[in-house]
Image (spheres, helix red, strand yellow):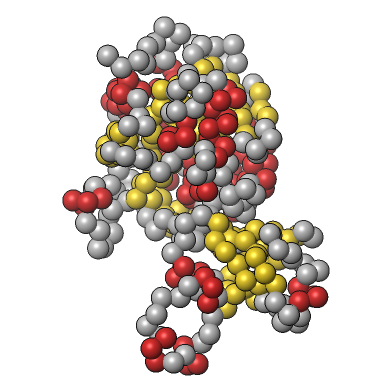
Amino acid sequence: MPPRPYEFLTRLLDSPGPSGFESAPARVWRAEADGFADAVHADVHGNCYATVNPGGSPRIMFAGHLDEIGLMVVHVDEEGFLSFAGIGGWDSQVFVGQRVTILGHAGQVEGVIGKKAIHLMEKDDRDKVSKVEDLWVDIGARNRKEALTRVRVGDPGVLTSTALRLPNGRLSSRSLDNRIGAYVVLEALRRLAGKRLAARVTAVGTTQEEIGYTGGGARTSATELDAQVAIVVDVTHATDYPGIDKRRHGDYKLGGGPILSRGSAVNAAVFDRLVAAADREKIPYSIEAAPRMTSTDADQIFTAARGVATGLVSVPLRYMHSPNELVQLEDLDRAARLLAAFARAVKPDTGFAPH
């Protein structure tokens, strides 16, 4: 990966932005888009938009969500310890022993997640699963009054982790789910900027996907754009590590290229065009079955407004919803190439209605 895109990716990943509080990564994303897009803006929900060829047709939306899972302060006790709840879907075991960055009203506040030491537990408690209510955040405060000068109820936070480059083109970080989707859609747009293109293409960094039970930013942004076609970029589970039943979860490898979903949220013509684009570009890919929901922004976009012809491109990822998720950088580049190739092939008279 060339230095500039990698530097942009790591700044994006390292910017704390749990669902509902995506301002920091959104600023990084918009600043990068300003360098090549014809128009860049944000809306009232925090969704970020970057457009090329604004007079083109049809209107294509590339969507990747900016938010990540996190936590929120729900109580400060008299000793200055913070009770918290998860933002998004957590395995509570992941919290144990972690460092935390809280987005306080006066700046970032560092802390650690505390738990009773194993030496002090009763024998029966040692084998029990830790629950969030058994844990707390220690920010080093001496009492509640001091803690409240730095944090308050409702402050969000993330587990403290930064991007780590590993051998063989691999990258570990928190927030890969799905900051890399927001990265890929903008990199696809970069490949289209200044090129001959029939369609209007808008990359969107959407908000609140991890808690988007009522549609989050994906539905409102698709409606604002009046999108006719949308490609969502998210992550899916790589199954190339021990203990995974591939008969249940499929066979997906890091470095295997993007994964194309098929299911009720995916328009058949969009899927076929993604396959054709991958074949033209000699991009390896896999297919993932999504017989019900996809659990991505695609579920919110395909029914937005009058309906949007939607596709889903996923990047294989290990250790989802942890502070050390893992991807292969080559898969990000391939996903961006695929989206750009798809958009170049769409013309004003291209039809997406099923036959």
Question: Looking at the image, can residue 233 be seen?
Answer: no
Q: Residue furthest top?
A: 349
Please tell me which residue lies in front, 197 or 137: 137
Please tell me which residue lies in front, 211 or 315: 211
Q: Is residue 147 above or below residue 22?
A: below
Where residue 8 appears, x then y in whole percent?
A: 59, 43
**On-image quarter of the C terminus:** top left
> As drawn, is 279 to the left or to the right of 8?
left
Q: Residue furthest front?
A: 214
Residue located at (62% from left, 36% from top): 47
Question: Looking at the image, can residue 299 be seen?
Answer: yes
Where residue 234 appears, x then y in whole percent?
A: 43, 41
Residue located at (24% from left, 47% from top): 250
Residue located at (60% from left, 25% from top): 224
Q: Residue furthest left?
A: 247
Where residue 229 appears, x then y in whole percent?
A: 45, 21
Where residue 175 appears, x then y in whole percent?
A: 52, 52
Total label count? 0
Q: Is residue 297 above or below residue 174?
A: above
Residue located at (45% from left, 22% from top): 307
The quadrant in which residue 77 appears is: bottom right
Q: Is residue 269 above or below residue 255?
A: above
